[in-house]
Amino acid sequence: MAPSLAPVLSALLALTGNAFGQKYTLAQTINAENFFEEFIFNTTGTITSQPDDNWAWVQFQNLNDARTNELARVRNDEVYLGVDHRTELDPNQDEGRRSLRLVSRNTYKHGLLITRFSHFPAAVCGGWPSYWLLGEGPWPNAGEMDLYEGWNLAVANKPAFHVGEEKVLGTCKMHPTFQKANVISDNCDNTYADQVTQWPFQGCQSEEPNGIWASDKGGTPEALEWTSEYIKLFSWKRGEEPANIDDDQPDVKSWGAPSVNVDDCDIDRHFAAQRIIFTLPFCGDPVGTPLFWSELDGGSGITCDKHTGKKTCIEHVASNPKAFKDFYFQVQDIRYFNSTQPSIDPASPTVTPARSSTAGSRNNMIINAAPDEYSGKKFV
């Protein structure tokens, strides 16, 4: 009997990775028709005893108040998510500017997540816009993925990952060789610091030179491809996306090198199921600290104290509501795709696609008995 070729082909698949390509099928679309049913409008951070986990000067609004104050609404068949840019406040009396923190009802693990925006928040002193995912469980051991984030007058998007201690959970690093974005720090361990290129709580972080940051035309920041072997982020300015990004079965292998690549990592150990989060806070740590307000300019060439004429972040945010008129996300849609991998039948050397998954199958979507108001589904 001739020897089976299955082991050889299995090894070849492991080496070539995306050469055969993951297969993806659309499982969920969130847009203006269902967006406000798919997200919870939190009035605190994950630490419910304080307004925000990072001590931001903010009052997060529930859905009813957000709609009443026109912070969240449908505009041009898309979802507008903004902040109060009309009310002048007293920095000594008021508790913060009205804003939003949205958390998805559903959790997601593995697959492809594509989010399209028609507007990103303007880069403004005191602002800290973020589109990110947070793991279900103790932070940072359950993982955090910051897809779109920056603050003050930053000139570029700086996606980052935060995970638990390397000595407990193993190595998790960003791979600088196989990505387009410039690596700032490569160790995703949130406690790691060399005091030269990486500091505590920084995680692994890159800087994207593609110009999507703060674009008033939007774009697709960090289409997220997540498997047990790697996490890849792809990013494009609006109008420069791959032609197949609109497809119900997009061909990721045709997209070229990712913007960010995390593959030196036990992905499933470091990243639990994640919830999607939008936040638009002000000041806090580090944004409003003296270091970032008066010493570091984020590459803009001017620090915020000089740009605003205000000694503190809160003083500026309180007295200049009009500065935040363009500080908003406008979302076209969020689409989640289930994954299926090429597989090898041990009895045959033929490489065949695995059976397609469907949104209703137990392997890809199960009801998650989540606590409190989070009564969504679990996508895996």
Image (tube, rainbow, N blue to C red):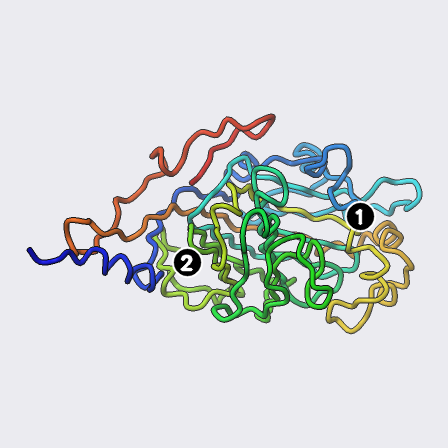
Q: How many marks?
A: 2
Report the residue marked by disc 1: 86
Provide the secondary structure element on which disc 1 rests. Answer: loop
Mark 2 or 1, closer to the camera: 2
Quarter residue 94 falls in: top right
Q: Viewed as shown, does residue 89 lie left or right of 345? A: right
Considering the image in quadrants, where does the N terminus appear?
bottom left
Residue that sits furthest to the left in the current view: 1
Q: Earlier in the sequence, mark 2 or mark 1?
A: 1
- Seen in the picture, residue 375 relative to 14 is either above or below; the reply is above
**Whole-percent x, y for residue 187 in the image:** 60, 60
User: What amino acid type should be assigned to the residue bearing mark 1?
Assistant: Arg
Q: Residues within 10 Å of mark 2 (few under 14, many from 20)?
A: some
Report the residue marked by disc 2: 245
Q: Residue at the location (71% across, 61% down)? A: 123
Considering the image in quadrants, where does the C terminus appear?
top left
- Seen in the picture, residue 269 relative to 197 is either above or below; the reply is above
Q: Nearer the viewer, residue 172 or 40?
A: 172
Quarter residue 160 falls in: bottom right
Q: Residue at the location (68% across, 57% down)? A: 202
**Whole-percent x, y for residue 175 in the image:** 51, 65
**Whole-percent x, y for residue 250 in the image:** 36, 56
Residue that sits furthest to the bottom in the current view: 301
User: What amino acid type should be assigned to the residue bearing mark 2?
Assistant: Ile
**Whole-percent x, y for residue 156 in the image:** 65, 66
